[in-house]
Amino acid sequence: MYRLLFALLLLPLLASAGLPLERIRLPEGFRISLVTDELPNAREMAWGAHGTLFVGSNAAGKVYALEPASGRVRVVASGLQLPVGVAFKDGDLYISAVSQILRLREIESRLDAPPEPEVVRSDFPRETHHGWKFIAFGPDGKLYVPVGAPCNVCAKDPDRYATIHRMNSDGTELELVARGVRNTVGFDWHPQTGELWFSDNGRDLMGDDVPDCELNRLTRLGQHFGFPFCHAGNVADPRFSQRPCSDFVAPVARLGPHVAPLGIRFYTGRQFPKEYRNNLFIAEHGSWNRSEKIGYRIKRVELNEDGSLKRQTVFAEGWLEDGDVWGRPADVLVAPDGALLVSDDYAGAIYRIEYVGR
């Protein structure tokens, strides 16, 4: 039922409300429309069991709820420290807030009077440099929580920083999943293999074209992906080059230098043409320290059956024009009806990309 409600909600919202969506270039047969532009600093998105779209934020310090039946946007939490990440399980909304993982119990029945966030776990590092966290529940039922490097490049406590961890939904049994991950702000699990795939933002201040940001695949618990010794699988760090790149897991795809890949999702819907099934969509937030800006787009990644890279192409672009930026994709999420949602923390917006046929 809520799939229909969601589709009906979007019908009156096709106007761009001042955002130049006609500039977005998409493959033939696709179109983009605006869902809302009332979510300042919108970041990670997550679906509730009854179709509520929850959206975290960074500088705004708020967590939003978009209700499909009415189109109403509510603030369900505020005053939090960089609550970028949201994840939903068993009626409860989980929120990342730098050193804390918080929970709003039975939130979809309490949108008008949300409960106070309760602390699930509070012993993650307090540094805000790469301290914001994309979070998600895996197919194993555990909550995956990354901890970014508290620096551009450093070798601080490798069991604590530049890692991905997982834990039970009640915060117990914290376990290390991956090392050498500078700053992942997006991950998902392959629909067929169940393997964890994640983006990683490459280090800065090595020049415009080095190193590439990464798309990685975890095939074994505890694997090391190179940071701070090696970047993008083939670039030794000038400060931490004691170990060869061959010691570490190389990325499946090099995405480009400083494109800042954030949210990634496998396409599991049925609305797009069949060739899009199980492809990865990546929100490239865009460069900040490059003389010529790149990114600010949605990338499509196709994989071979063995998990190797088949090809990567640009799926949606136009938020960057002649060096000027009017939007920054931060996350992507498959809607219940198979459309692809895109959050934009620069415009405070959620977009909907749908296939309407050639």
Image: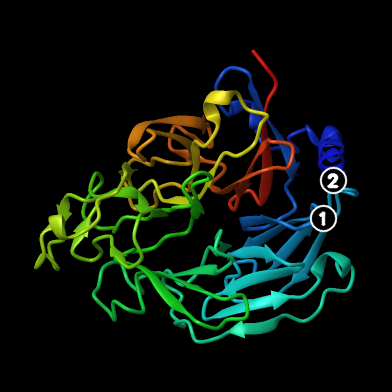
- In x, y percent, where is residue 59? 59, 66
Residue 337 higher or lower than 84, as above or below? above
Q: Nearer the viewer, residue 70 or 107?
A: 107
Q: 130 above or below 305?
A: below
Q: Position of residue 318 (x, y in %)?
A: 53, 32
Q: CA distance from mark 2 to mark 1?
A: 7 Å
State the residue position of label 1. Answer: 50
Q: Amino acid at mark 1?
A: His
User: Residue at position x 21%, y 59% from top?
Assistant: 248
Label 1 Cα neighbours within 10 Å, binned few <14 / some 14-19 / many ≥20: some
Q: Which mark is residue 2?
A: 2
**What's the residue at 24%, 44% (across, down)?**
209
Where is residue 22 shown, x and y percent of the image? Answer: 64, 26
Instruction: Name the image quarter holding the C terminus.
Output: top right
Question: Is 246 placed left or right of 284 in the picture?
Answer: left
- Rendered image coloring scheme: rainbow
Residue 47 in which image quadrant? bottom right
